[in-house]
Image (cartoon, coloured by chain):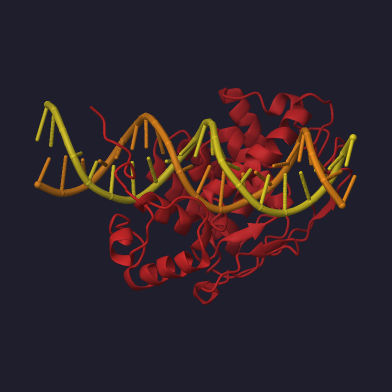
Chain colours: A red, B orange, C yellow
Amino acid sequence: MGRPPCCDNGVGVKKGPWTPEEDIVLVSYIQQHGPGNWRSVPENTGLMRCSKSCRLRWTNYLRPGIKRGNFTPHEEGIIIHLQALLGNKWAAIASYLPQRTDNDIKNYWNTHLKKKVKRLQTQPAEYFQTTPSNAVTSSNYYSPGSTHHKLQAMQAMNNYPTCSSAPSSEATTVSNPFQTWMTPSPATTATCKINMQEFHGEGAASIVCKDQTVGGDDKSSPLEMVAPVIMGSSTATFSLLEDWLLDDMPGQAIDGLMGISAGCCADPIMF
DNA sequence: AATCTTCGCAACCGCCGGAGC
DNA sequence: GGCTCCGGCGGTTGCGAAGAT
């Protein structure tokens, strides 16, 4: 039994990097018909690509609003925490970073963060330490799988800084001919002082996050709404988040989370 | 300057689950 | 209920770029 791969029967199906011309054809089609029904895309566009390839190209590269380039420390923190909570559920993690694709996050984890976390595991440096009373060390933080570990990760979320969500100078929004579709999300700003001591090296980072202000209006992206809550100290929020992460009541939990998020943005949690 | 090695990212592969028949 | 189709996901690979020798 079993179904052959969707592209197995494709005689002359092109593989490899996409050309700008192919990108234009694909985007033009999606602009007219909208994403979805990927099976029909190669048939109707004449692209010699399989449907999966079209979908991947769209979701990972051509989709409007994708941010490319270096991840901010804030994004890194979210990825690390969510990976600790969820494991390699890249799609779920990506849902908290709407401007990043799951593929991007996965690649970034595999090429950067995994090494960083591994290095931290083997060293006494307390990367995430914020206050002596509730410090979370790297060594006890990333022991995978256990509830204890998850709770620790969630606890640590209270301590992780919310840095500016505004596009950093290093991160760039994908540059393609279709940027006009993009709806730039309002910048969420936060005043957050971070003393980075060899952040990318083996040293510890001492983080001071005071007088945080979160700006933006009600149209903030889900990330911008959720992130302050994640970073804030809300027990209720974490219960909901945990429920959701554990897939007990995904819909209810995320609804509740979003509700709290909205409230949070109206009345931001201060550190 | 040439060659080798490492790194980062785009894309592919195979599996899974939901929907429709 | 079983089968097929299709979209989605996570793991892996291949290749070009960058760095090291």
Q: Whole-percent x and y of residue A145? A: 57, 24
Give the x, y percent position of residue A148.
61, 24
Q: What residue is drawn where x is 73% and y is 62%?
A: A168
Q: Nearer the viewer, residue B3 or A160?
A: B3
Residue A182: image location, x then y, percent: 52, 71
Comparing A219 with A267, the one in front is A219
Tell me where residue A190 sits by quadrant.
Answer: bottom right
Above or below, A147 against A81 in this view is above
Residue A106 placement: quadrant: top right
Residue A257 can be seen in this image: yes
Judging depth in this view, the residue of A119 and A219 nearest the camera is A119
Q: Position of residue C3 (x, y in %)?
A: 16, 33
Seen at 54% across and 74% down, the residue is: A177
**Which image quarter holds the N terminus of chain A?**
top left
The answer to whether residue A232 is seen in the rendering is no
Q: Is residue C5 left or right of residue A71?
A: left
The residue lying at 72 percent from left, 33 percent from top is A115
A1 or A60, nearer to the observer: A1
For residue A10, side relative to residue A191 (left or right)? left
